[in-house]
Structure formats: structure tokens, C-alpha cells
Image (cartoon, rainbow, N blue to C red):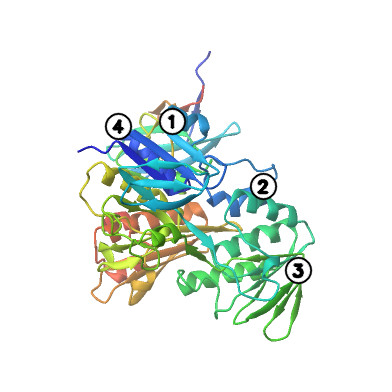
């Protein structure tokens, strides 16, 4: 039986992609997109880049504006939060008192920035929404003292942008190095060195004991002056709706290989979903990444209309800092050995091979034009479960495309 | 309007199934060589976020943007699905006298 009414909770990248892809596939039932933000769906990656640091006042980078959604006959219920799922009555309840009937429901509820539980925590700014980027844009003035808590993707992108604007920037990282979670150490070292060369101060293995209106207190007693404090310490999956509805959770909304939750008529995708990945022995992943949100949204649209295959897209991440690009495909931390390749112009690539010789992860840092093709080919090798010779991978004279 | 052809270098400047960037008259182009040694040209920047396509991967007749993997058929300029939805403009290319010639108007 073809479902007639599909309701999507969350109008970010993943939710919007479900709606658009359903129509692209010719689905002719009702599609309703429910979003807590008042805006039509927009892309978030520019928020830590051009939206704050561009010369022009930022405009919303729409995925689908009101007109496009209307053309696609996608119902948009925006500025309204979903409050409960009535799984028996198959209704989604909203905070404006309304309820929307569904045959199938998609949870694309995303993630919320983690906050520190510290005295003065309210002085810390976070970045998730367009409005957050507008606040940060106001605070990032030339000469301003900016303290960034957390040396991850968002923290370092903001540090680079602020430094280019002429701010005094200090990054405070609790781990021994920046980008410790997902980025291979040799690549993180290149980015860290670049930040230091540009005048960004990076403090590692330092805790924070509190914030005030104009300063950050460090655990070792130091006090850093701060005109703005930005907290980029990761995000927590938004699972409250799923939890209240009794759906299985596991570091996010737990889904199977088809991205179905423990209720077969409810799917989940994007930052909120934890899923088993067939390329990594079924290891359960939850990815906070634009590409994953996009891919899983498109996948769920197919699964909703009957596709039986499992989600197997290779994880892929990127970050832009100064004029350097970082791209990662697969899971470098699943590798047992590393083969580095010098791509020239200061660009470095690392291949990560599992104990059985299979390529499971790759990363590269350098100018976009130097690294992107190579990472893309490596991504295909990972998808094909290839086990290329480490000697060939490390030899810049061997064309990667030839290993496909 | 008169046809204006410009010298865009040697055909061998481009590897088979690959792309290079070519700038002329304040514009940037992407020049392609297919696996079977045919030549094509499109606008140089992706229609999504104005990224140089020459940094992207060519597979068959598809160029993939290096930033977000938006795909175009470089022989026709056709966008092949999200996140790109605006086609690329294409330009005639010919090999003449051992040179790669690009028609810019």
C-alpha cells in the first residue's frame, strides 16, 4: 500500500532533502515539513564561514525557499515545534495545539550545541542557527578579543575567520591537540601550525572553570579577556520527541540499516540518527555532517517509497580554515596503519588501512584544487572495500584513479 | 555576432578523462578531455557555490564539484541533481593546428 501522508519533523538539511527527493521521485501523496525555526530550509555550512565573515550582510542560503516548496507541493509548517508523537493514533502533535495525521513519519530533528555546565555559562555563544551567526557577526569586530572554547571544526573555522577580520583569538582545547575527535594527527598538525602562524593562540590540555561578561577563567588560574566567548564543543542529538514516544535510542535515535526506528513507520536521518554502517562491520555511527544529512535524507525518501537496500554511503566531512581545506572520507580511526602521500603545494593526504589491508579512511589538507579529486577517488576505493598496496598509496607518482 | 576563438593551449595539457582551468577575458572556464579524446568546455565555476570545477573529479562524461559533489554532464552542461539545479553554460571547442581552440562568443 502506498502511503498517502508523510510528515517530516525537522526542516534542516536532512528533512528538507527527504521532502524534495520524495517529489523528485514522483511521490504524489501529501508531504508536510515541520520546522521549529521560522525560516524555510537553509544550508548550515555557510554559517561558520561567509555568513559571519563575508563582506556582504548575510542572506539565508536556502535549500528550498517558500516558492520552491510551494512549487513542489510540500506543506511547510514553520516556527512550530512538534511536542509529541501519538504512535497509536498516528498523529504528530504541535505546540500550537494542532495535530497532523501521518502514515509514515520522519525524524530529522538534528542536534543541539553542547553547553558547558560552569559558572557564567550563559556568556558563552554557540553556533547552530542563522540567528546565532548574526549575533556572532555583530561581535566579531576588528581588534575584539575572541576566546573560542573547543578546537573542533566549528571552533577552528570561527577562529580562522575572526583572525582574518583582525580579532585577537585564543582557542582553548581540553585535549592534547586540536581536531582530536575525527582528524588524523598529521593533518591536524598542519592546520594547528597554520593557525599559530596566522597569530591564533592555541592552548591545549587546559580546562575552563568559568565565564564572566568579559573574561574566561581557566582551570589553571589564568584569566583571558574576552569580548566574545564562543563555545564549540560538539552537539548532542535532539532525541526528546523519540524518547517520549518510546522509540529505541542509542547515542541518538537508533535506526536499522534502512534508517527505520524501532517503529517501522517512523524513520530517522541526519544528525539525530545513529545507524549501523555495513562498511565498518555494522559499527553504529552518528554523524554530524552536511553530506551525511543530505545523503540520508535522499536515502529515506527512497526507503519510504519501497527501496529495500541499506544505507552504505561513505562518511565524508570537510572544513575550511584560512585558504586550507580539510576533507575526510571513511573513518580514519578504524585504520591500523597509515600511508601518507605528499600532494605537493604543502598538501598532505593520509590513507588509513585496517588490519586486513582494507582502506577504511582517508584525509587530506591543502588547497581545495589539490585535494578534492584525490579524496573523491579514495572515497570510491573505500566504498568498494579495496585493499590497495600501501606503497602505491604513498607514491605520489601512482595515479589513484588507476587503483579503482 | 562574430565568432571569437581563443587559443587555450595544447590538447595534451589535459589528461584523458580530466579537466583543467582556463581563464580568459576576466572569465574562468573548465576545459575537459573525455576518455575517447573529445574536448569540451563549460563555465569554470559551479552553479551552486562558485567553486572552481577544475578541482573536481571527472568520471566518464560527469564532472563533480570538489566542494559538495554536485554533478554535471560536461558534454551538455546539464545539472545531474541536488545540490546543483542550475545547468552549466557550455562552449564549443576544437583542435586546430595542434592547438586547443575555445569559442568564447
Give the residue at x 50% y 74%: A180
* Mark drawn on residue A26: 4
Task: Assign a secondary structure to mark 2.
Answer: loop
**On screen, residue A66 above or below A236:** above
Residue at image mark 2: A54
The mark that comes first in sequence, 2 or 3, is: 2
Circle nearer the viewer, 1 or 4: 4
Q: Residues within 10 Å of mark 4 (few under 14, many from 20)?
A: few
| Camera-side residue of A200 and A256 | A256
**Left of A261 or right of it: where is B28?**
right
Marks 1 and 2 belong to one chain: no
Chain to which mark 2 belongs: A
Total number of numbered discs in the rendering: 4
Mark 1–mark 3 distance (CA, rounded to whole Å): 46 Å
| Camera-side residue of A247 and A84 | A84
Placement of the N terminus of chain A among the 4 image quadrants: top left
Residue at image mark 3: A226
The image position of residue A300, as x and y in percent, is 32, 47
Task: Assign a secondary structure to mark 3.
Answer: loop
The image position of residue A148, as x and y in percent, is 65, 68
The mark that comes first in sequence, 2 or 4, is: 4
Chain to which mark 1 belongs: B
Circle nearer the viewer, 1 or 2: 2
Amino acid at each position: 500500500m502506498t502511503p498517502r501522508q508523510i510528515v517530516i519533523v525537522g526542516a534542516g538539511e536532512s528533512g528538507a532533502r527527504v521532502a524534495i527527493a520524495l517529489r523528485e521521485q514522483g511521490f504524489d501523496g501529501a508531504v508536510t515539513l515541520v520546522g521549529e525555526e521560522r525560516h524555510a530550509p537553509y544550508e548550515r555550512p555557510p554559517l561558520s564561514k561567509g555568513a559571519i565573515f563575508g563582506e556582504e550582510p548575510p542572506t539565508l542560503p536556502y535549500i528550498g525557499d517558500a516558492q520552491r516548496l510551494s512549487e513542489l507541493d510540500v506543506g511547510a509548517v514553520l516556527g512550530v515545534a512538534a511536542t509529541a508523537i501519538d504512535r497509536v493514533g498516528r498523529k504528530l502533535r504541535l505546540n500550537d495545539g494542532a495535530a497532523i495525521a501521518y502514515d509514515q513519519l520522519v525524524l530529522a530533528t538534528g542536534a543541539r550545541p553542547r553547553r558547558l555546565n560552569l559558572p557564567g555559562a550563559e556568556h558563552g555563544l554557540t553556533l547552530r542557527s542563522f540567528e546565532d551567526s548574526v549575533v556572532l557577526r555583530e561581535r566579531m569586530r576588528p581588534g575584539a578579543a575572541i576566546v573560542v572554547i573547543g578546537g573542533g571544526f566549528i571552533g577552528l573555522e570561527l577562529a580562522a575567520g575572526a583572525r582574518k577580520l583582525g580579532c585577537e583569538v585564543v582557542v582553548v582545547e581540553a585535549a592534547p591537540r586540536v581536531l582530536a575527535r575525527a582528524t588524523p594527527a598529521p593533518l591536524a598538525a598542519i592546520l594547528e601550525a597554520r593557525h599559530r602562524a596566522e597569530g591564533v593562540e592555541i592552548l591545549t590540555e587546559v580546562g575552563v572553570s568559568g565565564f564572566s561578561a568579559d573574561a574566561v577563567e581557566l582551570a589553571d588560574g589564568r584569566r583571558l579577556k574576552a569580548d566574545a566567548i564562543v563555545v564549540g564543543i560538539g552537539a548532542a542529538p535532539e532525541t526528546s520527541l523519540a524518547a517520549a514516544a518510546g522509540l529505541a535510542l542509542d547515542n541518538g535515535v537508533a535506526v536499522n540499516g534502512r534508517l527505520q526506528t524501532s517503529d517501522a513507520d517512523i524513520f530517522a536521518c541526519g544528525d539525530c540518527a545513529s545507524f549501523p554502517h555495513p562498511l565498518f562491520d555494522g559499527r553504529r555511527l552518528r554523524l554530524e555532517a552536511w553530506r551525511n544529512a543530505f545523503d540520508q535524507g535522499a536515502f529515506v525518501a527512497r526507503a519510504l517509497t519501497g527501496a529495500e537496500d541499506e544505507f552504505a554511503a561513505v562518511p565524508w566531512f570537510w572544513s575550511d580554515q584560512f585558504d586550507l581545506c580539510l576533507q575526510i572520507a571513511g573513518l580514519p580511526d578504524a585504520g591500523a596503519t597509515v600511508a601518507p602521500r605528499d600532494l605537493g603545494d604543502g598538501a598532505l593526504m593520509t590513507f588509513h588501512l585496517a588490519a586486513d589491508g582494507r582502506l577504511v579512511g582517508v584525509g587530506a589538507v591543502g588547497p581545495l584544487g589539490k585535494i578534492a579529486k584525490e579524496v573523491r577517488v579514495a572515497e570510491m576505493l573505500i566504498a568498494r572495500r579495496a585493499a590497495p598496496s600501501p606503497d602505491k598509496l604513498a607514491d605520489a607518482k601512482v595515479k589513484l584513479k588507476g587503483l579503482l | 555576432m562574430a565568432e571569437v576563438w581563443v587559443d587555450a593551449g595544447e590538447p595534451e595539457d589535459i589528461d584523458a578523462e580530466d579537466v583543467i582551468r582556463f581563464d580568459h577575458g576576466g572569465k574562468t572556464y573548465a576545459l575537459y578531455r573525455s576518455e575517447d579524446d573529445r574536448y569540451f568546455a563549460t563555465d569554470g565555476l559551479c552553479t551552486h557555490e562558485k567553486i572552481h570545477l577544475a578541482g573536481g573529479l571527472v568520471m566518464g562524461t560527469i564532472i563533480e564539484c570538489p566542494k559538495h559533489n554536485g554533478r554535471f554532464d560536461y558534454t551538455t552542461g546539464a545539472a545531474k541533481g541536488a545540490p546543483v539545479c542550475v545547468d552549466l553554460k557550455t562552449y564549443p571547442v576544437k583542435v586546430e593546428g595542434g592547438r586547443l581552440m575555445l569559442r568564447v562568443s
